[in-house]
Image (spheres, rainbow, N blue to C red):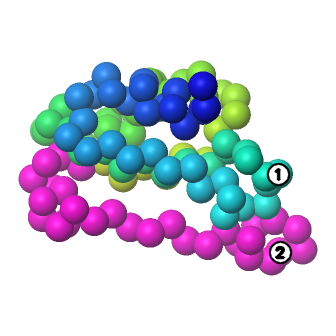
Amino acid sequence: MTLQTQIEQKLTALSPDVLRVENESHMHNVPANSETHFKVTLVSESFEAMMPVKRHQQIYALLADELCGPVHALALHLYTPSEWAARGGARPDSPNCLGGQRGEAT
């Protein structure tokens, strides 16, 4: 099972309306086929009346094993259904990586 699939399975515990787990490792200076950089977009009613930091903490708790090991970076875009609707179903794009060898964008 890929790490991406493992993350997706763990996040289904939040009964998401929308769940997108994107492996963005290819955008960074890592070996081919790496699973180190992920972006998660998750829309769930469980986030109602929850401050953003609490939402993040909930995800960190669910993915504790992955964050202690293979996952180097995790971008989180967490919304309630009404917040998601107000955004028109859009989340921010990830910026280009500024790290890597010789300071080049990779």
Say left or right for 67 vs 54: right
Residue 53 location (% of width, % of height): 35, 42
**Which residue appears at 33% of the width and 63% of the height?**
91
Say left or right for 55 vs 83: right
Residue 66 location (% of width, % of height): 60, 28
Above-or-below relation of 51 to 87: above
Q: Which residue corresponds to mark 1?
A: 31
Amino acid type, mark 2 = Gly
57 and 22: which is toward the camera: 22
Say left or right for 18 vs 31: left
Q: Secondary structure at mark 1?
A: loop
Residue 106 location (% of width, % of height): 74, 71
- Disc nearer the start of the sequence (1/2): 1
Amino acid type, mark 1 = Pro
Q: How many marks?
A: 2
Q: Which residue corresponds to mark 2?
A: 103
Using a 10 Å C-alpha cutoff, classify the residue at mark 2 as few (fewer than 14 neighbours), some (14 to 19) or many (20 or more). Answer: few
**103 falls in the magenta region:** yes
In the rendered structure, which segment of residues is drawn in magenta? 79-106
